[in-house]
Image (cartoon, rainbow, N blue to C red):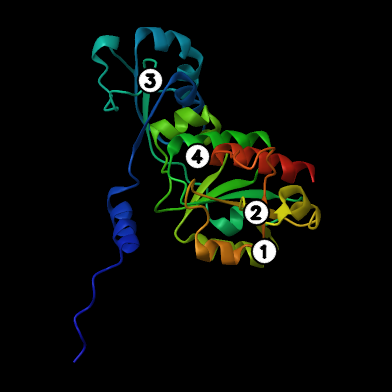
Amino acid sequence: MAGKPGRKPKWAIERDREKRDGPERVWLFGLHAVRDALVNPARTRHRLILTPNARQKLEDAVLASGMEVEVADPRRFPAPLDPQSVHQGAALEVEPLDWGDLSALCAPRGERPVLMLLDRVTDPHNVGAILRSAEVFGARAVIAPRHHSAPETGALAKSASGALERQPYLRVRNLAAAMESLKEMGYFLVGLDGAAELEIGEALATVADRPVGLVLGAEGPGLRQRTRELCDATARIDAASSFASLNVSNAAAVSLYAAKNC
């Protein structure tokens, strides 16, 4: 007799919930984040709350979006935000962006794409800053695992200062599987490691004609063992002092610059 079926894995439960209830909504806040979300045709928007002052500053974006505005007293701002959020009198309820699947987004198309992969980088301010750098240096996408990474939130959007609306931020079910798929597409994956023998420029110069994925780990733990094993090379960012170090968002910017100019 067949045994009793086991409990569904967490990812399957979440998938079924999304099919039933739709994606979980997010509150964006701050003038830049709200303005860019209002003019992004890919955004599904639900509720817009503005103070009179913010409404005046965002008038053109509000008109472009066609949304109705809930005008709020700044002393009793009704959006369900953290009390510490610097909302500047603007909040917008949205659904997370859908950037499609890995193969469609990242497949090389004649040019030399550069990707940024984040291994358990959970701080939304760091991820927001990385999205800004990725947009500046023309990265095809920023890729992170669906769990143990910074989700799309108001804090992340505000740190990204609008880049969240334009720079693909693809959260995958399994980072190792995504790395294997990218290698099959021809990507050369470089893991950032302060103890590596090669400097980042040296590592990238050897593959100047190949698509590149730059892989960064969380501050402190760094790259996980499996992530490191899947990298084709590891590289360091040279520092003037043996005690000097960069936080993950600064390291991302430096490595993206190196990839763009190698």
Residue under circle 2? 213
Residue under circle 4? 127
Density class for disc 1 (Cα within 10 Å; few <14, some 14-19, many ≥20) is: some
Q: Residue furthest bottom?
A: 1
Sequence order check, earlier mark of 1 and 2:
2
Secondary structure beneath dot 2 equals strand
Amino acid on which disc 3 is placed:
Val
Amino acid on which disc 2 is placed:
Gly
Sequence order check, earlier mark of 2 and 4:
4
Secondary structure beneath dot 4 equals helix
Amino acid on which disc 4 is placed:
Val
**Image height check: is 30 above or below 140?**
above
Sequence order check, earlier mark of 2 and 3:
3
Numbered disc in front, either 4 or 1: 1
Question: Residue at 61% across / 35% down in the picture?
Answer: 133
Q: Would residue 166 be seen by someone viewing this image from the given angle?
A: no
Residue under circle 1? 232
Tell me the tag on residue 86.
Answer: 3
Q: Would residue 85 be seen by someone viewing this image from the given angle?
A: yes
Density class for disc 3 (Cα within 10 Å; few <14, some 14-19, many ≥20) is: some
Q: CA distance from mark 4 to mark 1?
A: 24 Å
Q: CA distance from mark 3 to mark 1?
A: 42 Å
Q: CA distance from mark 2 to mark 3?
A: 34 Å
Horizontal arrangement in the rendering, residue 221 relative to residue 241 (left or right): left
Question: Residue at 47% across / 61% down in the picture?
Answer: 174
Amino acid on which disc 1 is placed:
Asp
Sequence order check, earlier mark of 3 and 4:
3
Secondary structure beneath dot 3 equals loop
Numbered disc in front, either 3 or 1: 1
Horizontal arrangement in the rendering, residue 116 relative to residue 222 (left or right): right
